Amino acid sequence: MDTIMVLKFGGSSVADNKKLELVAKKIAKIYDKGNKVVVVLSAQGKTTDKLIKEAKELSNNVSNRELDSLLSCGEQMSTAKLSILLNYMGYSAISLTGWQAGILTTDNNQDASIINIDTTRILKELNKGKIVIITGFQGIDKNLDITTLGRGGSDTTAVAIAAALHAKNCYIFSDVDGVYTADPNKINNAKKIKDLSYEEMLQLSSEGAKVLHNRCVEIGEKFKIPIITKSSFNEEKGTIITDKIEEDTVKSIIKKEVSRVSIIGNGIIRNFKLIKQIIDFIRSKKLELLNFEISETKISMVFKNIIPDENIKELHDLIF
Ligand code: ADP
Ligand code: ASP
Ligand code: MG
């Protein structure tokens, strides 16, 4: 037993008991291969949204400190449930909250950053042969107050833990089996991307593709941790995010808000064929462009009017 595997499961992957059971079986299988297993878990389904709504029903001036205290409960519930289930299945597991796992953060509630992870407790439990299940999205600040890392922040917890434990990779399991050329829930013939550079993924995340939290990509790049996104429910090969740079490849298209569209890919600035295709498309559809910016890895366009999903689909199918 010496390879440490860090596995993160998102909220939609553990939305109900049945899904939690599938996730538990997947974890057990990886543990049975002789790995040391650390799991980072999100709150179940829409729990975080529900908690925010409930706080706002009580007050129109919710304290940031109390909101974090409340939101952290979502992950505390899901991790305890998973541990109960794994124990029932005959595996020795333990759930740890952010503070129990040694996650120290800044004190800006709802947008805290991880400063340090003291891995003593995690390693102690791993050395006892336990599956260690850690709450995503939360930590503790220097005043011992609970903090959260921003919506979608469990990805960041996972990559930071992988870095602190010197794991070879960080696995992010979700309801999609990888990163696609567009949001597969909106564009039906979006294609799975085999690999992306950290820079490409960072651009995608910051343009709003919620498949990965952007800070997790920064941490992955800083500590050279490959991030592998896979499905929680099948064994398909996922997408790997590393520092591998491929020139002149177009990776993904994304619509942010209603009138901003970005296309991501290393070396896009030199891809004259693509630039011409885009400009011809805009002309043919008579779309009114307010801003067109191009950088090494991104073309960003802001239009005067709402861009219908139908146009995004047409542009996607033209490019990919
Ligand atoms: P989790 O609950 O596992 O954290 P998220 O909902 O945060 O999952 O992220 C997965 C979702 O990201 C997918 O269901 C998909 O709709 C969305 N998404 C947006 N853009 C992309 C993309 N380019 N590739 C894959 N998924 C994407
Ligand atoms: N539960 C948190 C959220 O819904 C964190 C996460 O899922 O990554 O934003
Ligand atoms: Mg997420």
Image (spheres, rainbow, N blue to C red):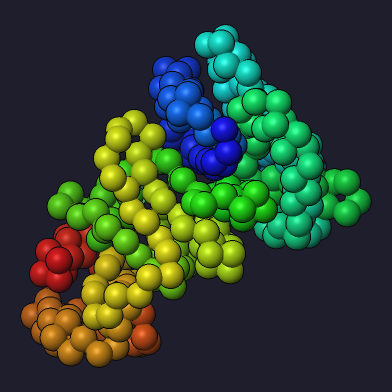
Q: Residue furthest front?
A: 1
Residue at left 67%, top 53%?
164
The answer to whether residue 318 is left or right of residue 293 is: left
Pick whichever, 157 or 319, lies toward us.
157
Decide if residue 243 is on the left or right side of residue 311.
Answer: right
* Residue at image coords 29%, 88%: 269
- Residue 19 location in percent, x, y? 42, 23
Determine if residue 108 is in view.
no
Q: Is residue 73 above or below residue 247?
A: above
Quadrant showing the N terminus: top right
Q: How far across and down, in percent of the image, does residue 215 sit? A: 57, 62
179 displayed left or right of 188 = right
Name which quarter of the figure residue 247 lies in. Answer: bottom left
Of the pair 126 and 69, the residue shown nearer to us: 126
- Asked if 127 appears above or below 138 in the picture, the reply is above
**Residue shown at 57%/50% (left/top)?**
167
The C terminus sits in image quarter:
bottom left
How many numbered marks, from 0 up?
Answer: 0
Q: Quadrant of residue 315?
A: bottom left
Question: Residue 223: percent from the left, percent from the top?
Answer: 59, 64
Q: Nearer the viewer, residue 25 or 107?
A: 25
Residue 168 image point, x, y percent: 52, 52
Is residue 273 visible in the rendered structure shown here? yes
Position of residue 138 in the picture relative to residue 269 (left or right): right
Name the residue nearer the viewer: 71 or 171.
Answer: 171
Q: Residue at x 78, y 49 (%)?
A: 118
